[in-house]
Amino acid sequence: MKSKRPLSFLIVASLSIAFVLPIIDAASAFPSGASSDSAPQGLGMLVQAASSRPSKQVTTGNAHNIRPNPKPSKCLMLAKKIGASRVWWGRHVGAKEVEDDDLFFSVGPRRVEFDDIGCFRTKKDCQNWLYWKRTEYPIFASISPCRRGL
């Protein structure tokens, strides 16, 4: 018979067991004839170490995998600074649906369209900008990949 418990319960339970086992092992390591002063102090230090360690290691994602969201430059201004042949540019055309929460009566979601060309110094910045625009405006997306030179 399948378990009806949610996956989140199983994850929490397995994490709890993983952090309690070292404490139980440490408590059993004290000899039965140990003084009452040394055992609770040592066990308290182990509990403190076990409880503080996971909070520093638990993250929502790897910091190296976070993409920056660069702001595009004005194409002509950037071309004057670094030269037109060194400018990287990309174009994204798309849309997204948003709810009008501030209106008293709403028929449904409205569509916000986006059509822009972004100019950048590096290919990586151009690719990151296109990534975020594809994410923000996924409907009917038309993308011109990053190209060099105006």
Image (cartoon, rainbow, N blue to C red):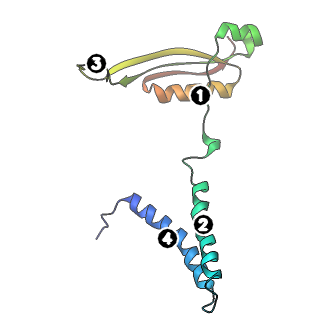
At which x and y percent is residue 140? 41, 22
Whole-angstrom CA distance, mark 4 to mark 3, is 50 Å
Which image quarter: residue 145?
top right
At which x and y percent is residue 141? 45, 23
Identify which residue, 86 or 67, lies in the foreground: 67
The structure residue drawn at horizontal position 46% and vertical position 17%, both measured from the top left corner, is 114
- Going from the N terminus, do you reach mark 2 or mark 4 first? 4
Which of the image's four quarters has the C terminus? Answer: top right
Above or below, comparing residue 8 to residue 98 in the picture: below
Q: Are marks 2 and 3 in contact (CB under 8 Å)?
A: no
Residue that carries the numbered disc 2 in the rendered image: 48
Between disc 3 and disc 1, the foreground one is: 3
Between disc 1 and disc 2, the foreground one is: 2
Residue that carries the numbered disc 1 in the rendered image: 69
Give the label on residue 145, or none. none
Whole-angstrom CA distance, mark 3 to mark 1, is 31 Å
At which x and y percent is residue 115? 49, 14
Give the label on residue 17, or none. 4
Whole-angstrom CA distance, mark 2 to mark 3, is 52 Å
Which of the image's four quarters has the N terminus? Answer: bottom left
Density class for disc 4 (Cα within 10 Å; few <14, some 14-19, many ≥20) is: few
The structure residue drawn at horizontal position 57% and vertical position 50%, both measured from the top left corner, is 59
The single residue placed furthest to the bottom in the displayed view is 33
Between disc 2 and disc 4, the foreground one is: 2
- Going from the N terminus, do you reach mark 2 or mark 3 first? 2
Give the label on residue 103, or none. 3
